[in-house]
Structures are given as structure tokens and as C-alpha cells.
Image (spheres, rainbow, N blue to C red):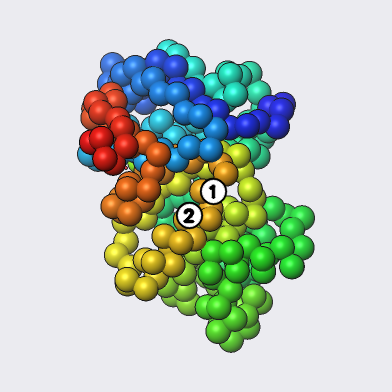
Amino acid sequence: DLPAIRGDVHFDNLVFEYEKGRPALKGISLEVKAGQTIALVGHTGSGKSTIMNLLSRFYDPVQGAVKVDGIDIRGVTIESLRSQVGVVLQDTFIFSGTIRDNIRFGRLNATDAEIVEAAKAVDAHEFIMSLPGGYDTEVQERGNVLSMGQRQLLSFARALLADPRILILDEATASIDTETELKIQEALKKLLAGRTSFIVAHRLSTIRNADRIVVLDHGRIVEQGTHEEL
Ligand code: ATP
Ligand code: MG
């Protein structure tokens, strides 16, 4: 098992291909200190999601290694890795069930009080309480009880409850009204605080607030630095 980690991440010369002879990553090296926020940007197909797929071990590299606190993640169980590496997907996954269950999915033994606390922290409590059944409101996987922004806030509450040391977030591109956008920015700040985060970033605000921006192109890092530097 992976012991409790600080959250240092080292991508060490990663090469990866989904299909033989068509490399999606052509030698990615990146060292990230625990607690930093990294924004990954680049054209479609440049390799952003692929790097994140290797960090959560949906695939293993053809060459090179992903190390967490210096430990090659191929040497630990997937369960122990994923308990400390959390993923918030772009089309924020909501399943059919109550709002409470959807948040609790982050940590199944969470108490009701902890669920409310997480929802409050990301400013989702108010809209949840305005629903007819509050936290017991039933939502559908593809239903429209929740707006896109509300679905995002719920997924943030779930991630906050899970409290992983390393967080991967594929930012949604959906257009959202200004008020919700501000809420999401605030919620994101809380969610990222104190953990190592990789965000496939689309919002300028996210990119601006990142400690480092990494620009990918055709499976290589072509530029990196802070928003001021780039
Ligand atoms: P986007 O901004 O569109 O999400 P991305 O930067 O996340 O793009 P990746 O999904 O990492 O890009 O894709 C990198 C390369 O790998 C692309 O050439 C893509 O076509 C290829 N690829 C991605 N997923 C698969 C897959 N499951 N099978 C085969 N090829 C894939
Ligand atoms: Mg992608």
C-alpha cells in the first residue's frame, strides 16, 4: 500500500502510446512540490488528460515513471493510490439517488454533519436547502433538477469530503452565469487549499491563480511558468 503521502509528484520522462507507433506523450518531465496548483493547458489532443490518466493509473507508461513522494506508483495497490489521488471529472458525475448520497460518495463513512459542512464550504448548502427535499432530494444521472454549476459545486463538495492529498480536476467548459462562476471560483480555492492539484484548465481565473502553468503541445511540454512569466 501507498503510505500516507505529503503529495510531491514527479513525472519522470513519461512516454506513452495508446496505439503502437502513435505516441501521445513523448517524454514528459515535471516536478511538483506538495501543495502546488498546476494548470495544464494546450490544444485538444496535446496530452493533458493522458498525463492525468497515468497519474491515476488508468494506464502505465511505456517508458519513465510517475512517482509520488518518490515512490513509483506501479509498486503500490491501485486502491491505496486512488484513496489519496482524487479525480473530479469534467462532466461532473452525478448518479441517481439523493443529494446526500451523491456527496457522501466522496467518503462513505461521512456523517450527515460532515456532509453539510462540506456543502457549506463550497457554498452549495443554500441551493440544496432551497430544493423541495433539501439533502434528501432525489436527482437523476441525466436529470435537470440541477444546473451545470450546481452539479459542479456538488462534485466539489464530494471531493472536499474525500480529502485526497492529490487532486486532479478536469475543468468543465460549459458556460455558466457570472454569479455561479464566482461561487465556483471561491469553492475551487477552498478545494485546492493544502493539496497538490492538477487542473486541466479552461477558465482564465483558474490559470491566473495557478502556481505554475504547463503548456502542452503534441505530447511535449513546450512552455511553463507563472501567469506573469508567460
Ligand atoms: P482535450 O483538450 O481534447 O481533452 P487532451 O489534451 O486531453 O485533449 P488527450 O486525451 O490526452 O488530449 O489525447 C492525447 C492523444 O492521445 C490524442 O492524439 C488522442 O487522439 C489520443 N488518445 C486519447 N485517448 C485515447 C484512447 N483512449 N485511445 C486512443 N487514442 C487516444
Ligand atoms: Mg482531455
Which one is in front, 213 or 156?
213
Left or right: where 105 falls relative to 40 = right
Quadrant of res 13: top left
Asked if the residue under mark 1 is in contact with the one under mark 2, i.e. CB atoms within 8 Å, the reply is yes
Left or right: where 43 falls relative to 121 = left
Residue in the picture at 32% in, 61% down: 174
* Quarter containing the N terminus: top right
Residue 120, percent from left and from top: 60, 69
Residue in the picture at 58% in, 86% down: 132
Which one is in front, 224 or 154?
224
Which one is in front, 139 or 11?
11
Q: Tell whether circle 2 marks a residue whose Cβ is less than 8 angstroms from ligand 2.
A: no
- Number of callouts in the render? 2
Residue in the picture at 31% in, 18% down: 26
Numbered tag placed on residue 215 in the rendering = none
Q: Is mark 1 on a helix, strand or loop?
A: loop
Query: Which residue is label 1 attached to?
Result: 193
Residue 172, percent from left and from top: 37, 55
Residue 181, percent from left and from top: 37, 66
| Position above or below: 106 against 13 | below
Cα–Cα span, label 2 and label 1: 6 Å
Query: Which residue is label 2 attached to?
Result: 189
Looking at this view, name the residue that lies furthest to the top: 63
Residue 44, percent from left and from top: 24, 40
Write down which quadrant ligand 2 falls in. Answer: top left
Q: Label 2 sits on what residue type? A: Lys
Q: Label 1 sits on what residue type? A: Ala
Q: Tell whether circle 1 marks a residue whose Cβ is less than 8 angstroms from ligand 2.
A: no
